[in-house]
Image (cartoon, grey):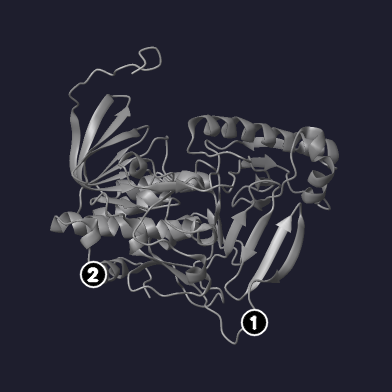
Amino acid sequence: MDSVNTIVEPSRELPVWADVDVCVVGGSCTGLFAAVRAARLGASVVLIERSNCFGGVATNALVLVWHSLLDTEFKKPIIGGLTKHVLDRLAARRAAEPVGNESVGYRMNTEELKIELDMLVKEHPNITPMLHTFGCRPLVEDGRITAMLVENKDGRGAIRARVYIDATGDGDVAARAGVPYTVRENLQPPTPCAKILHFRQEGVRFGEIYRDHAAEFGLPPDSGWDSPIPQLPNIFMAAQTHVFNVNAADAKDLTYAEMEGRRTIRAVVDMMRKYTPQGEKVALVQLPSVIGIRETRIVAAEHCLKEEELLHGVRFDDAIANGSYRIDVHAPEGGGFLFKYLDGRQVFAHNQRYQEGRWREPTPTNPTFYQVPYRCLYHRSVKNLLTAGRMINSDRGAFGAVRVMVNMNQTGEAAGTAAALAARADADVTRVDSVVLRKTLADGGSIIY
């Protein structure tokens, strides 16, 4: 051991802060929904979140869009559960509004979402929430996690649980517990979002302004999107840039991405101030707490969801989630993206230009939704760990579709339900009966086909 470049941390005894049925690490909507579903089945739950609020990318990264809860024909409900429940609660406050197209199902006021999620946790006294708390390290013995070491303002402590759920997005718990994972080449780049006053102006096409003037402001070729915000006239959420060639599960890359992302937002504002008719009115209203990460680690599981399975609507006996959002793969540079639809259509976009085509010829009928099996949520190497969220085991194409929040929310609900069932039976997560799991999800409001 090189004594210059390493140190030895002294060993110490840590207090056990909680001994519960289920420990969820990561308080995104995916993780919070896991905690709520487990709690509703009588489990005691600790919910760990490193930031100051719940909601993950939806709140901290300002991503205000949830995609359609209907099939591709906009006829058949395929997503219910807590996603629908929270949208209904927000709608009652005029903080969510339906849009209903292939790109956007609902727009939300994400500041209202923060409070609604707080209320949802408080309604379940068997959930112990821990904000500003980092899940540092899982202790593993004989293929089982025995404790999760955490750190916050009180110092360092341990959470004991019968079942653990990794909802970190990056698979931090799974990776540190020894579950195999991969980091693909050419990761989908993250996007910094912002709220900007007078981002949209009559007669202004932002894509053309960006294409003509990006280089002047030190911006690479790129493209993105933007959206109105419920209850906030003249303020828009803009997601018009990416940070390329970074792996946000790497500490140095993540630091660079956060700082570079903020720089690109300011550059966009300056560009609009210079080149739009109402430039003097353009103002930066809010920056995200974190950059909007699309892809980092892909954690191994018993099943890897394939693009072919998704595009052909393959049904699974252990399906725990349904989705209809298209394959949406962002290029690793240049701002391009590829869409593939279940009806065979294909769109390639680059530098604000679109090329339409087909990935297969037309057929008399098309699948109208796809499914995610329970087997995508666990790996046999750690018998009491479930993974829920965008680290889901899938190939590049399938990942481009299932990674979005309405789909990953369902994996959270399934993980929470399975964790409660496993804890109740003192069984491994690999042994949860999928028939019982699916019935329990349906009884709790999920749409199961």
Query: In the image, which disc is placed on residue 436?
Result: 2
Query: In the image, which disc is placed on residue 275?
Result: none
Q: Position of residue 2 (x, y in %)?
A: 37, 16
Instruction: Give the residue at x 60% y 30%.
Output: 259
- Is residue 86 visible in the rendered image? The answer is no
Q: Position of residue 312 (x, y in %)?
A: 51, 75
Q: Which residue is mark 1?
A: 362
Q: Which of pointers 1 and 2 indicates the residue nearer the eye?
A: 1
Query: Label 2's element?
Result: helix
Residue type at numbered disc 2: Val
Instruction: Give the residue at x 57% y 65%.
Output: 326
Q: Position of residue 263 (x, y in %)?
A: 67, 31
Q: Residue furthest front?
A: 1
- Is residue 229 visible in the rendered image? The answer is yes
Query: Label 1's element?
Result: loop
Classify 152 as above or below 59.
Answer: above
